[in-house]
Amino acid sequence: MIRARSVGARQRGFSLIEIILVVVLIGGIVAFAATRILGGGDRARVNLAKAQVQTLAEKVQGYEMDTGTLPNSLSELVVQPGGVGGWLGPYAKEAELNDPWGTPFEYRVPGESGPFGIVSYGADRSPGGDSVNADIRYE
C-alpha cells in the first residue's frame, strides 16, 4: 500500500520576520523613489523661474522700445500707465508677475549692474541661499 503523506506536513509559510523584512525593504524603496520624484519638482521650479526671469526681462525691454522709458513697476506691463505714450501692451499677464513659488518678482530701476534688475528669491522667499533657495537674477 502506498502511504499518503499529509499535505500540510511539508508545506511551509513565511515567518513573521520574513514578512516584516520584505515590508521594510519595500518601504525603503518607496521612500527613496519619493525623494527623487519630489526633488525633481524643485529643480523644475528653479528652471521655470530662470526662464520666467529671462522672459520678463525681454518684456521690459519691449516696453522700453515702445515707450522710450523703463516701467516704474512690473504692473505697468499689464495695465497702461497714465502719461506714457507709445504703449502697445499689455506686455504680460498678471500671473506672469509671480515666480513658481507664488511670490512676486522683485523689480529694480536701476539694477545693480544694468538699467534694471529682476529677482526671484527662490523657494525660501528670502535673499541669499543655495540650491533651490538661491536667488535667480536678471541684471
Image (tube, helix red, strand yellow):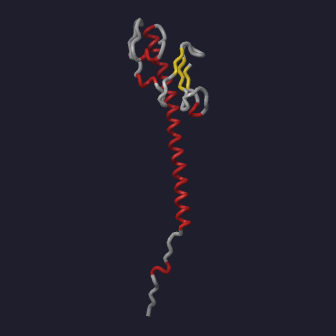
Left or right: 15 in relation to 97: right
Residue 100 position (above or below residue 63): below
- At horizontal 59% and vertical 26% (from top left) the residue drawn is 127
Residue 117 image-quadrant placement: top right
Count numbered badges in the picture: 0
Q: Quadrant of residue 119?
A: top right
Measuring from the top left, give residue 22's x and y in whole percent: 53, 61
Measured from the top left, where is residue 122 in percent x and y?
A: 54, 30
Q: Which residue appears at 50% of the width and 79% of the height?
A: 10
Q: Classify the position of the N terminus by image quarter.
A: bottom left
- Residue 134's place in the image compared with 19, above or below, is above
At x 53%, y 50%, the residue is: 31
**Left or right of 75, for residue 21:** right
Q: Position of residue 63 (x, y in %)?
A: 44, 13
Q: Nearer the viewer, residue 139 or 133?
A: 133
Q: Image check: 32 left or right of 2?
A: right
Query: Which quarter of the rendering shows the C terminus?
Result: top right
